[in-house]
Amino acid sequence: AQKVTQAQTEISVVEKEDVTLDCVYETRDTTYYLFWYKQPPSGELVFLIRRNSFDEQNEISGRYSWNFQKSTSSFNFTITASQVVDSAVYFCALGNEYNTDKLIFGTGTRLQVFP
Amino acid sequence: ETGVTQSPTHLIKTRGQQVTLRCSSQSGHNTVSWYQQALGQGPQFIFQYYREEENGRGNFPPRFSGLQFPNYSSELNVNALELDDSALYLCASSGPGNGSSYEQYFGPGTRLTVT
């Protein structure tokens, strides 16, 4: 069975703090894809990153970075120097190689950044 | 380039009624996926349409049905509404491709309340 676990329900930080959102996944597939989405109060999901199971390189995009570790089935997301605009619900999701649009989402982590 | 749009924004229905939700896909996209997001949960995949045919379905009963039109817009129909159907319904489009892409674009959702 495929499953995504985001154990952190809610995180609160003060602006400029670094914060890491955890994601643990379960799958028996050898080829799979991992995603992070941001959901602001407006409701629509905003794509942040996609990773395939064969690419364990960490990625950095501005203040965002992702750490993919197959050995621990984790795909964690770090925001450096957080800002109030980062406040949102963040979802980790898992897709299989046959239909990468059919995503299995975690329950999300609500991040609140206070000024 | 027009993004994914959904209508209506909000909807209130009574248990037992039927509802139709609409989604216009992003220009150039031929695949539409529908997700149900209950309060405090991650989105759950309902089904996907690719070139007017259903192309995958999640664990939802047959009273959840859909259509995709030649212009690739889509409808989600839910019959015999139940209280548990109260949720945010998200539409996502992707493509062009074969029904499996690496990046979906989500609409703002329709908030359905069943009383």
Image: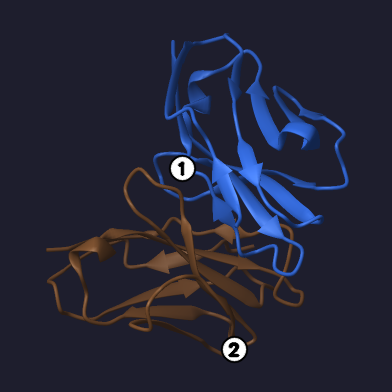
Chain colours: A blue, B brown
Pointer 1 local density, CA inside 10 Å: few below 14, some 14–19, many at least 20: many
**Residue B53 badge:** 2
Residue B100 vertical placement versus B74 (above, below): above
- Left or right, B48 with respect to B19, comes to right
Residue A55 vertical placement versus A112 (above, below): below
> Which numbered mark, 2 or 1, is in the foreground of this view?
1
* Residue B83, position as x, y percentages in the image: 18, 64
Quadrant including the C terminus of chain A: top left
Q: Residue at x 59, y 89 (%)?
A: B53
**Residue A68 visible in image:** no
* Residue B115, position as x, y percentages in the image: 11, 63
Q: Mark 2 near mark 1, Cβ–Cβ under 8 Å?
A: no
Q: Residue at x 51, y 10 (%)?
A: A15
Pointer 2 local density, CA inside 10 Å: few below 14, some 14–19, many at least 20: few
Residue B90 vertical placement versus B70 (above, below): above
* Residue A77, position as x, y percentages in the image: 66, 29
Q: Residue at x 65, y 64 (%)?
A: A101
Q: Residue at x 74, y 25 (%)?
A: A62
**Residue A6 visible in image:** yes
As rendered, which of B54 and A46 lies closer to the eye? B54
- Left or right, A60 with respect to A21, comes to right
Residue type, label 1: Thr
Q: Secondary structure at mark 2?
A: strand
Subunit that carries the residue with mark 1 = A
As rendered, which of A77 and B9 lies closer to the eye? A77
- Left or right, B10 with respect to B30, comes to left
Task: Check disc 1 and report the residue beneath it.
Answer: A107
Quadrant including the N terminus of chain A: bottom right
